[in-house]
């Protein structure tokens, strides 16, 4: 994954930042019981990195969408389809939903809710709510699902990369056990390379230890 990020970082950084700033405008239309605050207060470099992971996630989702697992697309109703999914996801405790574009959602979880520090084993406390997320994802089966793991900068880069991959893989495995078609799923680790806050404080490191789920619909 590091190789992929380095390969695209040069050409994607400016595009990713533009995409993020455009997303900020759309965030005012976010609905649900909670709203994502993760990016607020982060430096411009961190924002660009977060946008880059979204851009790469959308590219991976497109690869899934061209396959046969999802079948026919939604067509002109894609916006309403994602609206309905967003509302259900936002009602699940411990989650917030960011509307990235008409056909794309990014699901965030409260920091530390899924894993203990330096662990890739899902906490028992998280499994009920994560099961509800799996239920919504299974119901809205016209979306590709890209699970993205991130860490803080504690430990070596190699350790953090592997940890982020294991965490994303744990969520993927959980979804499969709970009935989500594995052909719709991809798991990716970004290690410590995409912080959304400073790693110099406990709170910043807590925000950087995260797993996001990108959902992109098949419109046609």
Image (cartoon, rainbow, N blue to C red):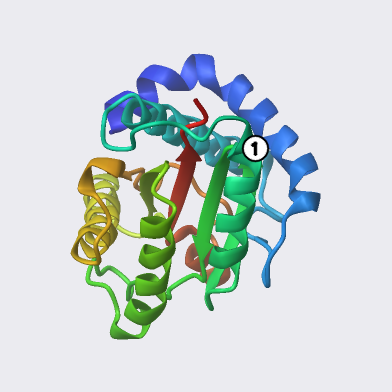
In what quadrant of the picture does the N terminus appear?
top left
Is residue 86 left or right of 125 when viewed as pictured? right
- Res 104 → quadrant: top right
Q: x%, y% of residue 189?
A: 31, 45
Q: x%, y% of residue 23?
A: 70, 39
Q: x%, y% of residue 55?
A: 51, 31
The residue closer to the viewer here, 220 or 51, is 220
Is residue 89 left or right of 213 when viewed as pictured? right
- Res 120 → quadrant: bottom left
Picture residue at 28% right of the left edge, 68% below the top: 118
Mark yes or no: residue 199 visible.
no
For mark 1, does the 10 Å Cα neighbourhood hold few (<14), some (14 to 19), or many (20 or more) residues? Answer: some
- Residue occupied by mark 1: 102
Is residue 113 left or right of 110 when viewed as pictured? left
Q: Secondary structure at mark 1?
A: loop
Number of residue marks: 1
Q: Is residue 137 above or below residue 10?
A: below
The residue closer to the viewer here, 77 or 150, is 77
Mark yes or no: residue 51 visible.
yes
Q: Is residue 188 above or below residue 163?
A: above
Q: x%, y% of residue 179?
A: 24, 61
The residue closer to the viewer here, 173 or 114, is 173
């Amino acid at each position: 994954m590091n190789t992929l990020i380095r390969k695209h970082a040069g050409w994607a950084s400016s595009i990713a930042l533009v995409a993020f700033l455009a997303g900020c405008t759309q965030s005012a239309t976010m609905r649900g019981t909670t709203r994502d605050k993760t990016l607020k207060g982060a430096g411009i470099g961190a924002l660009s990195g977060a946008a880059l992971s979204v851009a790469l996630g959308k590219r991976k989702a497109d690869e899934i969408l061209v396959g046969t697992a999802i079948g026919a697309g939604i067509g002109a109703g894609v916006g309403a389809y994602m609206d309905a999914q967003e509302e259900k996801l936002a009602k699940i405790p411990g989650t917030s939903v960011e509307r990235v574009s008409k056909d794309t959602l990014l699901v965030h979880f409260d920091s530390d809710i899924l894993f203990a520090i330096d662990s890739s084993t899902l906490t028992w406390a998280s499994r009920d709510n994560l099961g509800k997320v799996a239920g919504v994802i299974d119901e809205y089966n016209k979306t590709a699902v890209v699970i993205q793991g991130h860490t803080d900068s504690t430990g070596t880069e190699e350790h953090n990369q592997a940890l982020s991959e294991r965490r994303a893989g744990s969520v993927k495995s959980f979804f499969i056990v709970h009935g989500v078609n594995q052909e719709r799923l991809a798991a990716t680790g970004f290690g410590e390379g995409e912080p959304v806050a400073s790693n110099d404080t406990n709170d910043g490191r807590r925000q950087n230890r995260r797993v996001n789920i990108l959902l992109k619909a098949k419109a046609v």
